[in-house]
Image (tube, rainbow, N blue to C red):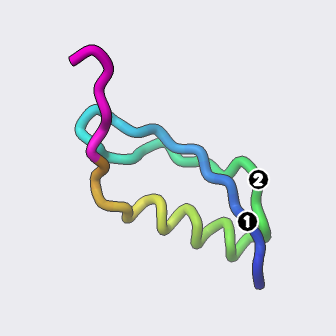
């Protein structure tokens, strides 16, 4: 199976990811795997603007 899954998510102030949804899927299995990968991502280091 191959394809591209577009996942939208919110990056919180502490770098955690939440509220992920599939915008464009590539089949149920691929969609579930994409959401799983996003849900287990390590915390990001958010950027700042003007300090």
Q: Is residue 2 magenta?
A: no
SS at badge 1: loop
In the picture, the disc for residue 4 is 1
Q: Which residue is mark 2?
A: 24
Please name the predominant secondary structure of the magenta segment in the image.
loop
The N terminus lies in which quarter of the figure? bottom right
Query: Badge 1: few (under 14), some or many (20 or more) residues near its Cα, within 10 Å?
Result: few
**Going by the picture, which residue comes out furthest to the top?**
50
30 to 48, vertically: above or below: below
9 to 26, vertically: above or below: above
User: Mark 1 and mark 2 in contact (Cβ < 8 Å)?
Assistant: yes
Front-most of residues 26 and 32: 26
**Going by the picture, which residue comes out furthest to the front?**
50
SS at badge 2: strand
The residue depicted at 21 percent of the width and 18 percent of the height is 51
The residue depicted at 29 percent of the width and 26 percent of the height is 48
């Amino acid at each position: 199976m191959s394809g591209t899954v577009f996942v939208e998510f919110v990056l919180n102030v502490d770098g955690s990811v939440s509220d992920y949804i599939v915008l464009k899927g590539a089949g149920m299995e691929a969609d579930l795997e994409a959401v799983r990968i996003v849900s287990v991502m390590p915390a990001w280091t958010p950027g700042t603007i003007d300090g």
